[in-house]
């Protein structure tokens, strides 16, 4: 392993391309551009309009942040599994992409305080006979690779260990819906906002929400690189101010509607 | 460079990745067998005097060769799905690679068939062999000898192509396993580097095995 | 009957993706050809201690799936702190991949020129450089061009893989449109047709050249 490390270090040295690190907050302000990784197949949080232009809650959130920083916003489309690679590979400065704040991920990326919270529901098609979360155990189910709900659902399927049950993961949300629509899978567990949007859109015949998934609330946060503390500080204050100013509730009403999710956890600091 | 490699984390999952490599070999070999069978039929089809046969064989071959393999696999999963014809990811991947293999092998086989002098066929037929017997006992053995090397290449291609299954939700082959591990840990470089090593080993082993088989079959 | 949400807007979006596919192909093939000619010449002309290592490295590029190479370089470059755009990553990976194949094509072409021809050229007083450019290059080109055209088409199709690192080329563009209008079959058929329209004429041209030149060489032999 040492040899590999040495080799990699040698390669890096040979490239001589490692600039002195300023905090990313400085880089963003200096470049006049904030590049946000946003997932655009997660309606109404992130999606495309009839001209295939990005719109949605996350897109507006990014624009608000850019405005606060006094820079231009640039939306970098990233499917869910690509959010963190995009950040690490420097294609984006921050991720405004409903990223669940798991401890496993915190080993690699830096999280702000939660900016939206979600609940998960079971989405299926009429006539599937699925009426509750527990009915999924002997069904073909699927979700978007690497998301909070995919990890939770796969874990439960493993726990149930029903021979007829099968878990399938796809690389983006759109493929999950397509798979459900075509019957590759019989049900999926998905964020309530996305599910109700899919039902409302009329694109998919017979989709219906049948139950809430018994998971804990999915708190999602803005992400950036682990070591960019200056930027993370800024993001925390920004999230706080979005709530304080009422802009959070306004955006939620504009794109999603219904009760605005509470972002605090009782009984603990932060 | 402020990245710390976590090679240990990747190496600890090596057994899972090796299981994935086995699935990869399985898909690739199956797709090769199917591809060879259909490829022979398509090659005969393209050389046939029947117009319908010739056109449909040509359509298969040109479609397979002029669109991306990734596109073909995606089509077998989601394209056919919209007809209500549902293949699971394994089958869709298998169908995609077999479709592609058949198209490329058909052209290879056609070249091989044309390289065999027609006088041999005539001689075999005049000795009383049926058309089928002539193909099976005289023409095809020689053809396979001619095209053995390109076929080896196609098998390696088959292995490399199977990495595309992840796009239709294939999670059990080497790339699928690697991507799942990556999604969980975000240690992209470590896991994919290990996958690269395993693919390289599979490609080399395939070539080595083919040499041995070729030597055994054609050493006369 | 023909009720579809697919608009001319969407077609333009697909064509924009196709244009990116073509751009990426051209850049990758340009990089790959330049490197391929240099490496191919080296492999055909230089002694084993240069030839073998080059061959081994290029062999790795041919034995690892392109998807894996793309992911590796994409994450590797950020580990090294390079700020390459996805297009650059795609072009570099595809370019090297092309070079790996192009090298063998060029090498085969050069080795196909009979040694006697080259000795004759040198004995007529030509320099090594003159021999290479006036004798070897034209003859090797004829042998190599059909395979090179095949390679170019292969690269064009392989560009579909760059969608993994976030480039909206033709296939990714069609996925985006499918997400919105939910007519996978129609959109995929159109995308497939666009690929075919780009690829098929070039592949016919390659086959034509191969046949014509094969005939020529027969005539020359007689």
Image: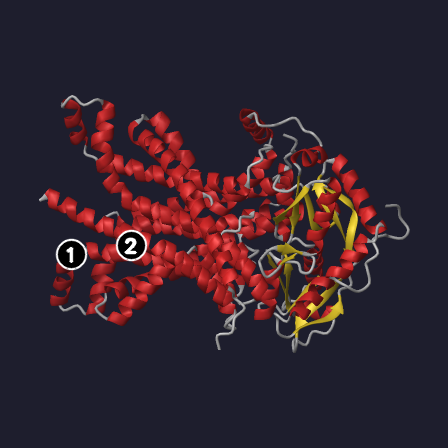
Residue at the image point whose x is 62% and y is 74% from the top:
A205
Residue B168: percent from the left, percent from the top?
54, 59
Which of A182/C185 is in front?
A: C185
Task: In the rendered view, tell whether residue C43 sits above or below residue B204.
Answer: above
Residue at the right extreme, as displayed: A267
Question: In this view of the protein, which residue sits in the foreground, B172 or B130?
Answer: B172
Q: Which chain carries label 2?
A: C
Q: In this view, does A27 lie to the left or right of B80?
A: right
Q: Number of callouts in the render?
A: 2
Query: What residue do we see at 72% from left, 74% from top?
Result: A131
Q: Give residue C145's mark.
A: none
Residue under pointer 2: C204
Viewer-side residue, C219 vs A243: A243
Rendered residue at 48%/67% (across/down) = C186
What residue is shown with label 1?
B117
A67 left or right of C144? right
Mark 1 surroundings within 10 Å by alpha-carbon count, few (fewer than 14), some (14 through 19), many (20 or more): few
- Determine if marks 2 and 1 fall on one subunit: no
User: On the rendered image, what quadrant is the N terminus of chain B found in?
Assistant: top right
Kindly give the residue lying farthest to the left in the view shown.
Answer: C222
Q: In this rendering, is residue C172 above or below C72?
A: below
| Rendering quarter of residue A254 | bottom right
Q: Which colour scheme is used?
A: secondary structure
Residue A12, x across and y down, in percent: 57, 28
Res. B12 visible in picture: no
> Which is closer to the viewer, label 2 or label 1?
2
Q: In which quarter of the image is residue B33?
A: bottom left
- Residue C6 percent coordinates (x, y): 52, 66
Q: x, y percentage for residue C15?
A: 46, 55
Q: Which chain carries label 1?
A: B
């Amino acid at each position: 392993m040492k040899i590999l490390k040495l080799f990699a270090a040698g390669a890096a040295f040979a490239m001589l391309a490692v600039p002195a690190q300023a905090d990313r907050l400085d880089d963003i302000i200096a470049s006049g551009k904030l590049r946000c990784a946003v997932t655009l197949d997660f309606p109404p949080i992130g999606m495309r309009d009839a001209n295939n232009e990005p719109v949605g809650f996350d897109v507006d959130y990014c624009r608000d942040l850019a405005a606060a920083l006094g820079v231009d916003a640039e939306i970098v489309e990233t499917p869910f599994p690509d959010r963190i690679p995009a950040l690490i590979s420097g294609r984006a400065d921050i991720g405004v992409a409903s990223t669940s704040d798991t401890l496993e991920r915190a080993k690699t990326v830096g999280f702000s305080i939660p900016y939206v919270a979600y609940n998960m529901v079971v989405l299926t098609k009429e006539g599937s006979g699925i009426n509750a979360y527990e009915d999924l155990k002997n069904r073909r189910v699927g979700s978007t690779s690497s998301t909070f709900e995919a990890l939770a659902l796969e874990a439960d399927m493993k726990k149930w260990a029903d021979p007829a049950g099968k878990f399938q993961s796809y690389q983006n949300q759109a493929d999950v819906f397509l798979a459900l629509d075509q019957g590759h899978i019989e049900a999926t567990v998905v964020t309530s906002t996305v599910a109700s949007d899919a039902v409302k859109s009329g694109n998919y015949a017979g989709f219906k929400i049948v139950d809430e998934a018994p998971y804990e609330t999915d708190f999602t946060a803005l992400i950036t690189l682990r070591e960019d503390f200056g930027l993370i500080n800024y993001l925390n204050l920004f999230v706080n101010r979005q709530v304080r100013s009422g802009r959070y509730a306004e955006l939620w009403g504009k794109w999603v509607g219904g009760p605005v999710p509470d972002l605090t956890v009782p009984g603990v600091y932060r | 460079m402020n990245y710390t490699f976590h090679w240990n984390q990747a190496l600890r999952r090596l057994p899972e990745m090796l299981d994935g490599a086995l699935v990869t070999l399985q898909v690739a070999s199956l797709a090769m067998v199917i591809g060879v069978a259909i490829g022979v039929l398509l090659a005969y089809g393209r050389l046939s005097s029947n117009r319908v046969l010739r056109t449909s064989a040509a359509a298969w071959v040109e479609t397979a060769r002029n669109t991306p393999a990734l596109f073909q696999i995606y089509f077998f999963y989601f394209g056919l799905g919209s007809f209500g014809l549902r293949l699971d990811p394994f089958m869709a991947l298998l169908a995609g690679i077999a479709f592609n293999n058949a198209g490329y092998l058909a052209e290879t086989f056609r070249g091989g068939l044309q390289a065999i002098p027609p006088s041999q066929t005539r001689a075999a037929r005049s000795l009383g062999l049926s058309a089928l017997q002539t193909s099976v006992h005289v023409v095809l053995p020689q053809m396979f000898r001619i095209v053995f090397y390109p076929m080896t290449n196609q098998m390696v291609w088959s292995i490399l192509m199977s990495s595309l299954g992840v796009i239709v939700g294939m999670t059990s082959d080497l790339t699928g396993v690697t991507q799942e591990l990556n999604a969980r840990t975000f240690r992209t470089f470590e896991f994919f580097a290990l996958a690269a090593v395993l693919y390289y080993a599979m490609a080399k082993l395939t070539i080595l095995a083919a040499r041995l088989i070729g030597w055994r079959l054609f050493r006369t | 009957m023909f009720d579809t949400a697919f608009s001319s807007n969407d077609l333009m979006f697909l064509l924009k993706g196709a244009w990116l596919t073509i751009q990426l192909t051209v850049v990758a093939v340009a990089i790959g050809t330049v490197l391929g000619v240099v490496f191919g010449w080296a492999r055909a002309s230089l002694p084993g201690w240069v030839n073998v290592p080059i061959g081994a490295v290029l062999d790795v590029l041919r034995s690892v799936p392109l998807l894996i190479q793309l992911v590796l370089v994409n994450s590797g470059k950020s580990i090294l702190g390079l700020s390459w755009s996805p297009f650059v990553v795609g072009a570099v990976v595809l370019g090297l991949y092309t070079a790996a194949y192009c090298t063998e094509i060029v090498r085969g072409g050069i080795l196909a020129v009979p040694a006697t021809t080259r000795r004759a050229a040198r004995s007529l007083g030509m320099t090594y450089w003159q021999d290479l450019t006036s004798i070897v290059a034209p003859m090797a080109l004829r042998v190599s061009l059909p395979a090179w055209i095949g390679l170019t088409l292969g690269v064009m199709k392989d560009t579909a893989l760059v969608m993994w690192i976030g480039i909206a080329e033709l296939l990714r563009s069609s996925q985006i449109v499918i997400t919105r209008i939910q007519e996978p079959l129609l959109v995929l058929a159109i995308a497939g047709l666009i690929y075919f329209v780009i690829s098929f004429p070039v592949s016919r041209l390659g086959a034509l050249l191969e046949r014509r030149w094969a005939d020529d060489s027969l005539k020359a032999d007689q």
